[in-house]
């Protein structure tokens, strides 16, 4: 029998043994072409503290809605689609369940796929927060591209690729780490 508990910090689904971790999700899109380059599996995290005005994923805001899905189940869906170029973590806010997303991201990269993570936090906020929330830094380390910043309705631009408002950035984290500046 699987024991699911809720993380007090953000009502997350996790099992005590991280090898059988769970993620509280709002849903999955198996063949996305809008959440990053190529064909992607997109995991929509459930729970978001940002509550951006005009958010197109308002149903992902509650930390207690959605469903718990095992990371192994997500891995099986990825294995089943040999055409995938990568996996995207969206939301909700993936960094609120960073511990579980790190497990999945490490496995995804070991399969030769890339990881894109969407967040309402800025890169600078995540780096600063990574000092006290080590899992934030670990998820940054396992992310190839980060789309950062809250959605701002007044800066909405439907012509932008992979983002909704002009304040959001697509950051190449590998190059950012190599060059020690945001790229």
Image: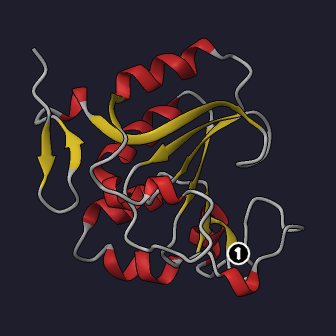
User: Which residue ends up furthest to the bottom in the rendered image?
Assistant: 154
In the displayed structure, does residue 64 sit left or right of residue 167? left
| x and y, in percent, of residue 67 in the image | 34, 35
| x and y, in percent, of residue 38 in the image | 80, 38
* Residue 176 occupies quadrant: bottom right
Quadrant location, the C terminus: bottom right
Local crowd size for mark 1, using a 10 Å CA cut-off: few (<14), some (14–19), many (≥20): some
Q: Which residue is mark 1?
A: 183
Count of numbered circles on the image: 1
The way the protein has been coloured in the rendering is secondary structure
Instruction: State the residue at coordinates (58%, 79%).
Output: 180
Instruction: State the residue at coordinates (29%, 59%).
Output: 135
In the displayed structure, does residue 110 sit left or right of residue 73? right
Residue situated in front as seen by the camera: 67 or 8: 67
Q: Secondary structure at mark 1?
A: loop
Residue situated in front as seen by the camera: 98 or 50: 50
């Amino acid at each position: 029998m699987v024991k699911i508990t809720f993380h007090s910090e953000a009502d997350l689904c996790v099992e005590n043994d991280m090898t059988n971790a769970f993620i509280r999700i709002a849903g999955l899109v198996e063949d996305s072409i809008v959440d990053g380059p190529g064909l992607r599996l997109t995991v929509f995290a459930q729970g978001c503290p940002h509550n951006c005005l005009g958010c197109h994923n308002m149903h992902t805001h509650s930390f207690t809605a959605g469903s718990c899905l095992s990371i192994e189940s997500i891995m099986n869906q990825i294995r089943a689609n040999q055409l995938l170029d990568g996996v995207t973590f969206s939301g909700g806010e993936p960094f609120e369940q960073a511990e579980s997303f790190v497990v999945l991201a490490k496995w995804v990269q070991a399969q030769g796929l890339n990881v894109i993570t969407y967040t309402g936090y800025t890169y600078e906020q995540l780096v600063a927060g990574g000092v006290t929330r080590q899992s934030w830094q670990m998820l940054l380390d396992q992310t190839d591209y980060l789309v950062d910043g809250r959605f701002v309705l007044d800066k909405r631009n439907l012509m932008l690729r992979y983002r909704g408002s002009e304040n959001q950035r697509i950051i190449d984290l590998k190059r950012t780490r190599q060059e020690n500046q945001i790229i």
